[in-house]
Image (tube, helix red, strand yellow):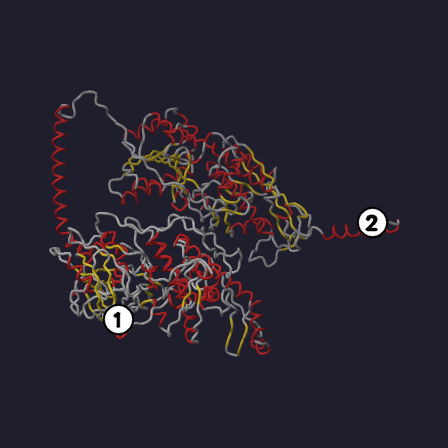
Amino acid sequence: MPQKGKGLLACLYLLTLAAVMLHAPATQATHTLTFRVGTVIGERGLCSEMGDAHRGYLLFANKLATEEGAMHITDSSGAQHRILFEYTREDDECELQKHKALIQQLINQDRVHFLFGSTPVFAVAESQLANDAQRLMYHCCVGPDSLYQMDMQYVFGIQSNSDRYSKKAIKSMVLEGGVKRLYIFALDGNIFTSSTCQAAADYAVSVVSKLMPGFEVVQVKRYTIAEASADAGFYETIVQEAMDLEADAMLGCDFKDGGTTVARLMGSQGYHPKALWLTVAPAHADFMTALDEEASEHTLSAGQWHPTFPSADPLHGTASEYSAAFQQAYGQLPSYVAAGASATSFSLAKAVQAAFDGCSFLDQDLDADRLLFDASAIECEGSSGNTATTGYERVLDTLLKQTLDTFFGEVVFDRFRRNVAKDPITTQVQSGVIEAVLPLEFASKRMDLPHGQPPSLAAEDDDDIGSLKEGEFVAVVVVVVGSVLIACLGAVLFLLWRFKFHKAEGMDDHSVISPEDLQVINEPVQRWDGSWESGKALYKNALVALEPLPNIKLQSFSEPNPSRYLTDLANGPSGYTLDEMFMDVEGSSGADFPRTNTGGLDSPVNYTPPRNSNELQPQDVTPKGPVFESQLPPRSVGSGSQRVHFQGPQDLCHSPPETPASRQDVVLNLDGLGLSHRASQPWSCVSPAPQIPLSKSQVLKLLWRRKSLQHPSVVPVYGVVWSLPCLPCPNTLVLVRELQELGALSSVLENETMNLDTVKQKDIAVDLAQALAYLHAQESPRLKPTLQPRLLGVLLNKHCRAKLMVPLACMLDVLPSKKGVGTPSRDKSSASCRGWSRQPTTSLSQVHFQDPLPQQANAHEEELEDVLRYGLGMACMMTAERRQVRSSNDVRERDELAEGSFLTQLQYGYLVEDHGEGMAALMADCCAVTSNCRPSFTQILRRLETINHLRRKSSSHHWRANSLSFSSPNLVSLGAHASGGRATTADDLLYELFPNHVADALKQGCSPDPEPYPCVSIFFSDVCGYTNICSTLQPQEVMDMLHRL
């Protein structure tokens, strides 16, 4: 290459390099702002635990100096100024005068900008010095209210009130641990120890003693540091005094050394009360190393933080991550003192950052001194009402208004500048580890209160027991104990006899309702097919529904011939399995939906009469397979010729209406009995399904189990009426339940004048999933499938919220049986489950879920059966409008099942268009052909919450992104719906205008609870010339102007 060409290339390279250097780091930190912070901390005597505070301050300062933990102030020009803390620690050897002198040294000689607090022993003294010098004193480890109520302008604290330390622990010790006699000792002359134990004593006397009669505080021992130091055996006298008073629990407020000494002496003297609660000492890991396992085990304490806290911040991460970083740096686990110190430093750094973000720096190279104390160095206009003149005042004002989430917990200050957003926790040493036990939402282990024994105060050396010799005393005891045992045995036998013969009468008082107690408004009405429409009545000034139970036949206790049950069964109609017949025990149509035949004409029924008993045994009723799945077409997950076809999606959502003319003879098969009977549908007092003979005691057992199922989304039951005179069949049982104003969901869906928008449909889906998750969490016995096909039994109240009517059939295991009846097992082998989840995205229409497939082992077959019914029912509800349109257009094309699911392809497409792919994928998973591929109701709830959250987020995004536009002079369009392209619903607008909890209350027809705010500012303004401006602008331009304002 010629020399001239090489020179030209070199020039171009230099010019390019210069341009890059000129335009390079406009966003990088131009210089550093170093703030001087300091503290005075000793680690001797009463201050021994404060070494953790020093390590917590130092850990944050070191992390702030790393690139990973860097924090910056971004000024108005976009330049960044890095924040650093120059940390200084002085050692006062836990002497008050030296402590005061070192505080003065930090202020006057070291000229620190901010001071960090140390031990509660010197809290008042150092706070007064800092406040007089107008230097911020930020306490990490001082909790008493008395310090902050002095209202010193420059004193802040991150800990919660220590007066609340012991209240929950005392209540648990007394109510759960059986403590009767409490001994309290407290170090006087210190705001922390004296106020903490004073609050404990007041609470024990004024509150706990009223909750537990017989509980008392036997002694409150107060002492000073001088008294404890002067006598080497001082703490031994405290332990001996508690033993003499037969205290079965001790509560002490002292520092680390005092508490450790008391615990050691109790162990050495063999004094093991039911509970021991101490401040400070058991919250540190070296408490266990200083004592043997017996002396430290089960000791209770209080703290402000634990590594299991569910809190985090961007700098430290989670509480467990902070704990790991501290242990890596110092070789020991952090205490709450160390965590509070690091959180205090982080809170101060965030306040400094927020105070100067967006301000104009008149000198880009100014130092921290000028930034804090030179009012002319910066200009911060429009800074959210901050009226401070100097930078230091801005920091104080920003800190006072701070609302911050940290790994230590939330930080919010009251007017006395102390944190009020935290609750203290109770800890306990268990197996040599400090565990959080209270409050329960933060607990890592359950509180363990062993039943210790008070010490033996007087050991008798002779064999005399009172006035009796040892042998005489033993004889008396044997006679007395034997007599008591014989009397108790006789009483038990008498009670068993009474219970056996008077059980039904005793239960009548709670579950049987007399017809005279009902004011009937609308009588139950019998339909043509024998089913009943429920009535309405007034019971104890409450509106209730009256549900006839035609399929339960009351048998008398003296009726010995079980062949009558076969006669009743043979005279009944076919087309019902026993499982479905039990679904109708409560009058499955209720007042709210039509009677629907879910079985085929020859559905087999297995029935075995009771043997040697007048009562029906659960094992005598064996449904042949799941009812709902038996009515479905043959299942196939294949393709091509193996694919199952339907005549439209409504095949699973509706049954063709039956009329008297369309009824035909049906065949009833009695397997194993050799019986076959042909009969037509009954009329009048005969049930449309075979009647089940139950005694009154059996009905009451089922009813008691039904009444115990209490959930906001489960219809409450009040009782049963053995016979209602107004009915044409006087022996028909009538169930009294809560009235649901809108009736059955199926009736609402078939009513063309009532429409459910997508938001109400999703609310119904959530209500029903919550009810089923609660029901299938029941144990001993486990409920059978509770959801009826096509959502029969789902009712709506006046707020359009769903409630589930639980059939008695799912509770037959309550009745006594000679052998268990298990659910037919399914193939538990690993199945190939079709994946319906999508790739992660922020769009509502493409939702990604992490629920594992196949189904988790803790979901039982009964729950999976209900999941299928839930999925098909919800899909039919959410596509009802589309199916009506399709039916009105007389569309007859064949619809295929989606692969691996009972959901049809048209239904899936409708769900995607109207509700988004997230909801469509959930319904497809619920309708999976293979049962172990279906999610549990717990997983369904979690996925519904995610879908609703993303829907609200997407709606909010579209509200902000799309301005109001006029499609016609009288119509305002609020933008496209995120999941289906429809107009934004009224619910979306409601959530946009109000906070979520207020919108939820308004949707349910409730008035939101008032919320007090200590300080509220209201701004009133007028737009000059608004009328003239509006007269010259288009409506869209007016809305744009208002949005900008």
Q: Amino acid at mark 2?
A: Ala
Q: Earlier in the sequence, mark 2 or mark 1?
A: 2
How crowded pointer 1 is (Cα within 10 Å; few <14, some 14-19, many 20+) is rated as few
The image shows residue 43 at horizontal and vertical percentages of: 50, 31
Is 86 above or below relative to 714? above
Q: Is residue 404 left or right of residue 859?
A: right
Question: Residue 708: where, in percent of width, then height?
Answer: 27, 54
Q: Element under label 2?
A: helix
Q: Which image quarter holds the C terminus?
A: bottom right
Give the residue at mark 2: 10
555 with respect to 625 (left or right)? left
Q: Nearer the viewer, residue 11 or 305?
A: 11
Whether the residues at callouts 2 and 1 have beta carbons within 8 Å, the answer is no
Q: Mark 1 belongs to which amino acid?
A: Gln
Please give the name of the residue rendered at 44% of the width and 69% of the height, measured from the top-left corner.
Answer: 894
Residue ID at (27%, 45%): 210
Distance Cα–Cα, label 2 vs label 1: 101 Å
Disc 1 secondary structure class: loop
Above/below status of 199 relative to 768: above
80 on left or right of 775 = right
The x, y position of residue 298, in whole percent, is: 36, 34
Per the image, the residue denoted by label 1 is 664
As drawn, 1022 above or below 854: below
The image shows residue 380 at horizontal and vertical percentages of: 61, 56
